[in-house]
Image (cartoon, rainbow, N blue to C red):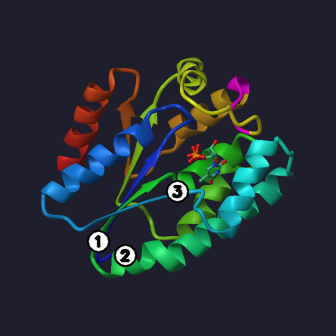
Amino acid sequence: MNAGSLITLEGIDGCGKTTQLPAIAEALGQSGRDVLETREPTDGAWGQRIRSMARSGELVAPQEELRWFVEDRREHVEQVIAPALARGQVVVCDRYFLSSVAYQGARGLDWEAILDESERTFPHPDLALIFELSPARALERVRARAGTPEPAFEREPYLERVAAIFAAVERPYVRRIDGSGPPEAVRQAALALLSD
Ligand code: TYD
């Protein structure tokens, strides 16, 4: 059991979760919680390696790619997440193990096995919010915002498979949010789920 709580934001690239994170953290703070915002991939050594792989378009075997994300998460849990939970903080994490389930599962790995293994290894989220949006619309948003798309991850057929796995995951801690509306509507939906 965690002393604090772990809230994770999940969904395909462009789904809007990163836009909503500050609003979610702020609402939790206003209700008196001690909040820690964090994200994966992290800024640690594994996270940097992952980002440079994504930027360069370098193709890494799925099993190896999974290993990098798991090592990044192991470090993140040990150094950041577990101590914060032990202090009783509410940790709001932009991506967590469901991203490995969906993204590395979409590269052909057994996603149910990744989920089982993740749950054996890492603290479970108390709440995992999955922001749902069609890959076509999500990619429009990604292209519209500043910065270059990441070729290793942001391709439509691949994101279709990622979205299908996010849609298939059934766990008591998962709640889904329609990410297709304007940011204010999505924010209201997220806050309503949090107050539940
Ligand atoms: P993203 O949240 O887009 O980070 P940022 O926008 O801050 O660079 O994450 C980068 C990519 O990593 C994203 O396309 C999803 C992918 N990813 C995985 O494939 N597996 C994982 O376990 C995680 C955490 C992310």
- Please state, as top left, top right, bottom left or bottom right, where the N terminus lies in the image: bottom left
Earlier in the chain: of badge 2 and badge 1, it is 2
Q: CA distance from mark 2 to mark 1?
A: 5 Å
Asked if the residue at label 3 sits under 8 Å from ligand 1, the reply is yes
- Secondary structure mostly seen in the magenta stretch: loop
Q: Amino acid at mark 2?
A: Ala
Earlier in the chain: of badge 3 and badge 1, it is 1
User: Does residue 82 lie above or below 165 as drawn?
Assistant: below
Is 145 covered by the magenta stretch? no
Judged by depth in the image, the label closer to the viewer, 2 or 3, is 2
User: Does residue 22 lie above or below 182 as drawn?
Assistant: below
- Contact between marks 2 and 3 (CB within 8 A): the answer is no
Tag 2, which secondary structure? helix
Q: Which residue corresponds to mark 1?
A: 89
Tag 3, which secondary structure? loop
Q: Nearer the viewer, residue 66 or 76?
A: 76
Range of residues picked out in magenta = 153-157
Earlier in the chain: of badge 2 and badge 3, it is 2
Residue 96 is labelled as 3
The residue positioned 32% from the left and 27% from the top of the image is 183
The residue positioned 86% from the left and 45% from the top of the image is 59
Residue 75 location, quadrant: bottom right
x, y percent for residue 126: 35, 60
**Which class describes the residues within 10 Å of circle 3: few (<14), some (14-19), or many (20+)?**
many
Q: Amino acid at mark 1?
A: Gln
- Contact between marks 2 and 1 (CB within 8 A): the answer is yes
For residue 97, side relative to residue 182 (left or right): right
Q: Which residue corresponds to mark 2?
A: 84
Residue 195 visible, this angle: yes
User: Does residue 60 lie above or below 123 as drawn?
Assistant: above
Q: Amino acid at mark 3?
A: Tyr
